Amino acid sequence: MPSLNVSFTDDEMEAVRASAAAEGKSLKQYLHDLGVREGQRQRFVSGAVRWADRLREEFDEAFPDEVPPAYRDRGAAAA
């Protein structure tokens, strides 16, 4: 199984150890889960952006006062 050596400053390592302890995990498990969660977060955000982009025009038409001022002059569809 692939592995990774990561360097931390003393202060960073102290903070990471404290975070792992707060979650009741070993340092190894905490860092593993952190990487996995970040991948999941990125996929979620990407999906949320695609969903918002598909609905943006409909939302802007339904709630014209919510269109940011910087986009109002260019029309709601440009937002």
Image: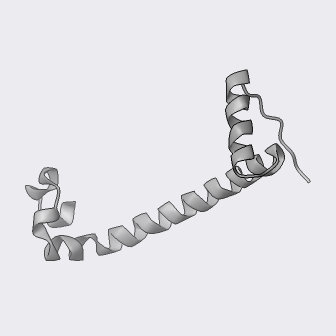
**Coloured how?**
one colour
Q: Can you say whether 21 is above or below 1 in the image?
A: above
Q: Quadrant of the N terminus?
A: bottom right
Direction from residue 74 to residue 47 in the image, left or right: right
Quadrant (top left, top right, bottom left, bottom right) of the C terminus:
bottom left
Please tell me whether residue 6 is drawn above or below residue 36 in the rendered image: above
x then y, percent, for residue 63: 15, 72
Q: Is residue 16 above or below residue 60?
A: above
Q: How many marks?
A: 0
Instruction: Tell me residue 73's x, y (percent).
Output: 7, 55
Q: Position of residue 11 (x, y in %)?
A: 68, 24
Q: Residue furthest right?
A: 1
The residue shown at (68%, 43%) is 19
Q: Is residue 42 left or right of residue 53?
A: right
Q: In the picture, residue 54 is in which quadrant?
A: bottom left
Place of residue 6 in the rendered image (x, y in percent of width and height, measured from the top left): 78, 34
Give left or right: position of 7 versus 73.
right
| Residue 50 position by quadrant | bottom left
Who's the residue at 17% across and 55% down the image?
68
Q: Which residue is rendered at x = 27% and y = 70% of the image?
A: 56
Question: Residue at the left extreme?
Answer: 73
